[in-house]
Each structure stands twice: as C-alpha cells, then as structure tokens.
C-alpha cells in the first residue's frame, strides 16, 4: 500500500473549526432553551464548554447580519447611481442591468486564425444588457444617453449572435450575489473585452463591410470607430425592456 499523501494544500482556502454551539431544550409545552459554547483545540475537538456569553452572542449576530446584508446588496450602488445605468432588476436570482457606454478605447484580443493583432482600438458607443449568467450587446449611433426610442445597431464584434447575445465560450463567469451595480457592469465589460474574439456567428456580417478588415485597420491606431459601417437591426431600446 502506498503512503498517504497530504493533498490539503490543493484544496484552496481551508476553514478551520473555531468554536461550536450546542442547543439544549427542555420537554413540555413551555420549552426552555439553553446554549452552550465550545472552543475547539488544534485537532478540531470541542473543549472548554461554557454558557454562551453576551459577547459571543453579539459576534454571532454580527456574522449573521453581514451575510444577510450581502444578499440585499446585490446590484445596489456603492454611492450615487452611475449616470450610464438605464434600468436595474434587483432580484437576486433573476437580477439584470441595462446600461450604456460611450465610445471608448479598449484592449482587445483575437485568435491567431483571424490574423488580427491584439492591441488597443476604439469601440463604438454600446448598449449592454446582462444577468448573472448572460450578456447581450448592441451598438449605438452616438454618445448621447439613449431613450426607449433610440435605434440599436448590431455590435460590430465577433462571437455575437444575430439577436445580440454574446457567446462567452470557456470564459468562467463569476458574478457574486453581493456584487454592487458598479462591480457587475465593470465585471461584464472586462469579461467581454478580455476574452478572445474568434469567429462570426450567423449568416451575415454584423457590419456594412468586412469585419476582419475593419479591426485590422482599427487595432493599434488612434482612429475613431467609423459609425457609418454600423448595421441597424430594427430594434429599439424599448424592445430590451419587454
């Protein structure tokens, strides 16, 4: 038989037992409850049994309140709500955010097969609509704050379906239940631009022209995104809120 190997270092974060509570209850209609607190020794065995003190009870209460507050914090702002936020659904399970970004210069990555170098380039103004697990993006015709009647354009990128949904491939999406709206939107923008653009989805080009040649021309230049190549998709912002 081979010697046992300690693999605990590969488990990630390890949590060690610190203390334990045992609840005792009397029988009968008017049951009385007594709580006993145990410390734990280095081997995880309970020692030093004593009644739960007021200080220990307060520490426990703070821990429970903190976890509850984390759940309530989902998609709440860290301060004043950012002006680019258009709509928020705070539901922890089905929460979503609709926001827009002005034209911005971002680092972009492309697979070798496209023969487009990685580098910085200007992206057009964009609409972003995301839940914890999915992302939909469109382009806008200007930097102005959009309204319900603002027409949407196909996002001029790779890895995007014709309905605007983004194929994130093998990207590990990790949006926490405690994420503020700023963490949520910044996180999704980073997931999008830090993943590798690899291929077009759908039968048609998302722009008026050749998408590969467009990004070859824009990458590592100071050229603004040419809005004349954007292709309308017959949707408005109102369609996303239905």
Image: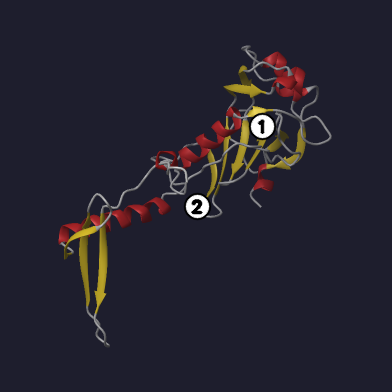
N-term-proximal mark, 1 vs 2? 2
Q: Position of residue 42 (x, y in %)?
A: 24, 49
What residue is drawn where x is 62% and y is 20%? 122
Q: Position of residue 228 (x, y in %)?
A: 74, 23
Quadrant hosting residue 197: top right
- According to the image, label 2 marks what residue? 90
Q: Nearer the viewer, residue 15 or 181?
A: 15
Q: Is residue 5 visible?
A: yes
Q: Nearer the viewer, mark 1 or mark 2?
A: 2
What residue is drawn where x is 61% and y is 22%? 108
Residue 149 circle label: none
Q: Position of residue 148 (x, y in %)?
A: 64, 44
Q: Is residue 229 above or below residue 36?
A: above
Compared across the picture, whether 152 is left or right of 81 comes to: right
Q: Is residue 49 above or below residue 170?
A: below
Local secondary structure at mark 1: loop
Tags 1 and 2 touching, CB below 8 Å: no
Q: Nearer the viewer, residue 132 or 126?
A: 132
Compared across the picture, whether 66 is left or right of 84 comes to: left
- According to the image, label 1 marks what residue? 140
């Amino acid at each position: 038989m081979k010697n046992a190997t300690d693999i605990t270092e590969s488990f990630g974060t390890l949590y060690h037992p610190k203390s334990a509570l045992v609840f005792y209850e009397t029988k009968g209609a008017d049951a009385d409850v007594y709580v006993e607190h145990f410390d734990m020794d280095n081997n995880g065995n309970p020692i030093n049994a004593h009644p739960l003190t007021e200080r220990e009870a307060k520490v426990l209460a703070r821990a429970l309140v903190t976890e509850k507050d984390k759940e309530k914090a989902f998609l709440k702002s860290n301060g004043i709500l950012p002006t680019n936020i258009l709509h928020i659904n705070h539901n922890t399970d089905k929460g979503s955010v609709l926001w827009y970004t002005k034209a911005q210069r971002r680092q972009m990555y492309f697979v070798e097969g496209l023969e487009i170098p990685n580098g910085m380039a200007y992206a057009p103004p964009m609409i972003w609509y995301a839940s914890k697990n999915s992302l939909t993006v469109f382009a806008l015709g200007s930097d102005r704050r959009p309204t319900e009647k603002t027409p949407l354009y196909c996002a001029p990128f790779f890895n995007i379906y014709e309905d605007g949904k983004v194929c994130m491939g093998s990207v590990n999406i990790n949006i926490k239940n405690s994420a503020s709206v700023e963490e949520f939107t910044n996180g999704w923008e980073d997931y999008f631009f830090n993943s590798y653009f690899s291929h077009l989805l759908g039968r048609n080009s998302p722009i008026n022209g050749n998408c590969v040649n467009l990004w070859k021309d824009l990458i590592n230049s100071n050229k603004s995104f040419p809005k004349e190549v954007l292709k309308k998709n017959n949707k408005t912002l109102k369609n996303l809120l239905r």
